[in-house]
Amino acid sequence: MAWTSVCKINDILPNAGAAALLGDTQVAIFRVQDQFFALSNRDPFSQANVLSRGIVGSLDGKLVVASPIYKQHFTLDGGQCLEDPDVSIPHYAVRVDGDAVQISLSAE
């Protein structure tokens, strides 16, 4: 698995997201409960690259991000839409190496 450093740990505020462009792929990186998650930044319902601006929280015991456009919730650990089980978005492996947040574009 190839890893790319995208930012420093402190570049992402706790309980928030940030966007990164890796090649042609926009990735939304979230920091929640001192864990990092990476999803596609593209909202499949609005077709806009906005998920990094969504609100993170917990719903039905799952960590989620709510799309800022139509408010669908996507699980941070797998990209599954809670409102529509037929819809999911790509999620990516993320790790911390020292103070760098790294992502592998190989979908998990």
Image: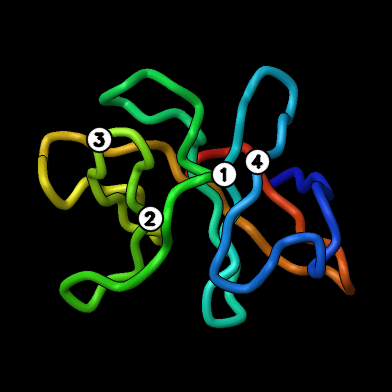
Which of 31 and 100 lies nearest the eye of the viewer? 31
Query: In the shown orientation, is residue 51 left or right of residue 21?
Result: left
Q: Position of residue 101 (x, y in %)?
A: 77, 60
Q: Position of residue 70 (x, y in %)?
A: 25, 35
| Disc 4 and disc 1 in contact, CB within 8 angstroms | yes
Between discs 3 and 2, the one toward the N terminus? 2
Considering the numbered disc 4 on the image, is that residue within a helix, a strand or a loop? strand
Q: Amino acid at mark 3?
A: Tyr
| Residue position marked by numbered label 4 in the rendering | 19
Identify the disc placed on residue 67: none
Between discs 1 and 3, the one toward the N terminus? 1
Query: In the shown orientation, is residue 70 left or right of residue 106?
Result: left
Between discs 2 and 4, the one toward the N terminus? 4
Which of 20 and 69 lies nearest the eye of the viewer? 69
Q: Amino acid at mark 2?
A: Val
| Mark 4 vs mark 1, CA separation in Å | 5 Å
| Residue position marked by numbered label 2 in the rendering | 65
| Disc 1 and disc 2 in contact, CB within 8 angstroms | yes
Rendered residue at 58%/75% (across/down): 35
| Residue position marked by numbered label 1 in the rendering | 28
Rendered residue at 22%/46% (across/down): 81
Please state the total of marks drawn on the protein image.
Answer: 4
Considering the numbered disc 3 on the image, is that residue within a helix, a strand or a loop? loop
| Residue position marked by numbered label 3 in the rendering | 70
Whether 55 is drawn above or below 89: the answer is below
Query: Would you identify the image quadrant in which residue 28 lies?
Result: top right
